Image: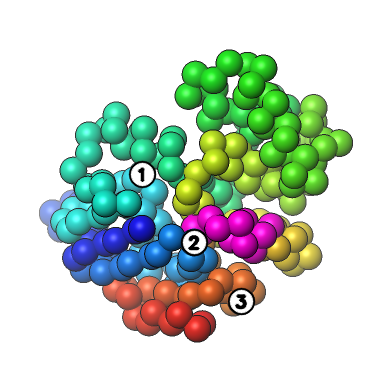
Amino acid sequence: MIELHGVRKAFPLGEREVVALDGIDLRIDEGEFVALMGPSGSGKTTCLEILGALSRPSRGRYQLDGIAVDGLDDDSLADLRAERMGFVFQTFHLMPRMSAVRNAALPLLYAGVPRAIREERATRMLEKLGLGDRLSHQPAQLSGGERQRVAIARALVNDPRVLLADEPTGNLDQQTGLEILKIFRELHAEGRTLVVVTHSAEVTAFAERVIRIRDGRIEHDDPNR
């Protein structure tokens, strides 16, 4: 489903460049739950950004379902993200003055879905994630775990095939983080492809495959953890 071939990503820094990824080869099959693990500065988040079509490789090829992602223009990349991908971030990125339903429905708003339909779909997703009694609450009225579940609902409301998460439990206490990981396990059981960036062994315990990245290279790829 996902294939990277010789992917390099470098950022200019004055007269030199900083290499974040240095020749990454990676294949992720449909329905896998993969953890990208590594220390800070290892390149794991840059790898996730390329997988999510949020950043372009400096060199190399990226294919998603046979589509040459690295050759798409900006509009086509935006369409690809909207149609096939969902994103969950460490800091939630919720709109502070919007209710949980309106936050979860945002991708549908950008896709031009009528209001009644997008609110119905967002409500159904929030209820599935145990937030049926928090639909009208704004982020400040929710706990950290509830905010992350709203963010997950937003990521899933378009029914994406791939869910990408960057340190999704990083701002949560241990018990709340465990609850989020159980949700991820359920999503994986439904057949979704999950790629999660983490430095936590607790997160990798839920994945079926762990890829360790160090200094911009894949150091170890363990299908059995």
Q: Nearer the viewer, residue 154 or 125?
A: 125
State whether residue 46 is above or below residue 37: above
Which quadrant of the rendered structure holds the N terminus? bottom left
Judged from the image, the secondary structure of the residue bearing numbered disc 2 is loop
Q: How many marks?
A: 3
Name which residue type carries label 2.
Gly
For marks 1 and 2, the one nearer the N-term is: 2
State if disc 2 and disc 1 touch (CB < 8 Å): no
- Farthest residue to the left: give it: 15
Question: Is 42 situated above or below 135?
Answer: below
Q: CA distance from mark 1 to mark 2?
A: 22 Å
Question: For residue 132, which numbered disc appears in the image?
Answer: none
> To which residue does mark 3 refer?
205
> Within the magenta stretch, is there residue 96?
no
Secondary element under disc 1, as helix, strand or loop, is: loop
The residues colored magenta run 183-194
Q: Position of residue 173 (x, y in %)?
A: 74, 62
The residue to which callout 1 is attached is 54
Q: Residues within 10 Å of mark 1 (few under 14, many from 20)?
A: few
Residue in the image at 47% along x and 51% along y: 162
Local crowd at mark 3 within 10 Å, few (<14), some, or many (≥20)? few
Q: Position of residue 208 (x, y in %)?
A: 53, 74
Residue located 77% across and 40% down the image: 127
Say if the magenta span includes residue 188.
Answer: yes
Q: Residue furthest right?
A: 133
Percent across and percent down for residue 18 are 23, 60
Q: Secondary structure at mark 3?
A: loop
Disc 2: which residue: 31
Q: What amino acid does circle 1 point to?
A: Leu
Task: Give the left or right position of residue 219, taking residue 163 as reference.
Answer: left
Q: Quadrant of residue 183?
A: bottom right
